[in-house]
Amino acid sequence: MHAQVKHLPWRDIPLDHRTRDKAHHRAEIRRLKVAAFSHIDYPGARQAVQVVRWRRDLTTGKLTVERVYLITSLDVFDATPAELAAWIRGHWSIENLLHHVRDRTFREDDSKVRTGHLPRTMASLRNLAISVFRQDGKTNIAAALRHTGRDHQRPLRALGLT
């Protein structure tokens, strides 16, 4: 399916949406093209999306270009290209928020746990902890972990088990 979407005639498809941002010491341009199709072999798929991201690191000057392909079940009348772009950005903000906490607070990328089911189990436990803290209204997960770790009854109370 990836090959089918990648090989659509993207050069012939007009640009549908473009944004330009500066943040986090980088300048970024995002270009989005949308193609309606009926010949891609995936149930319910109605449109393909190509997102090209041009990022320039403002401190080093390094330029990276990334192409991402997506499919959606939305019809051309269900969402504008601008709405699709906003939803794609929204998805990544959620993903980045979770990954940032898992990597920085739990140091997940440095974990030595690599075999069997344990990596997935540990990731699930980290997600559970983050979800419980956020559901409890905590925004600083590191501070919530420190606070909870000072009393062995606090995690049980947070889960409603005492």
Image: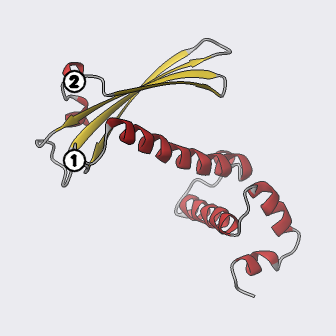
Amino acid type of the residue that numbered disc 1 sits on in the rendered structure:
Asp
Q: Position of residue 148 (x, y in %)?
A: 82, 68
Near-viewer residue (107 or 101): 101
Q: Is residue 2 left or right of residue 128?
A: left
Amino acid type of the residue that numbered disc 2 sits on in the rendered structure:
Ile
Number of other residues with Cα within 10 Å of mark 2, as a class: few under 14, some 14 to 19, many 20 or more: few
Q: Position of residue 51 (x, y in %)?
A: 37, 30
Q: Residue furthest right?
A: 150
Q: What residue is shown at x 71% (from left), y 53% (from top)?
A: 106
Dividing the picture into quadrants, the one containing residue 134 is bottom right
Colour scheme in the image? secondary structure
Q: What residue is shown at x 73% (from left), y 76% (from top)?
A: 158
In the picture, the quarter occupied by the C terminus is bottom right
Residue 111 in view in this figure: no
Dividing the picture into quadrants, the one containing residue 58 is top right
Residue tagged 1: 75
Q: Residue furthest left?
A: 39
Q: How many marks?
A: 2
Number of other residues with Cα within 10 Å of mark 1, as a class: few under 14, some 14 to 19, many 20 or more: some
Which element type, helix, strand or loop, lies under badge 1? Answer: loop
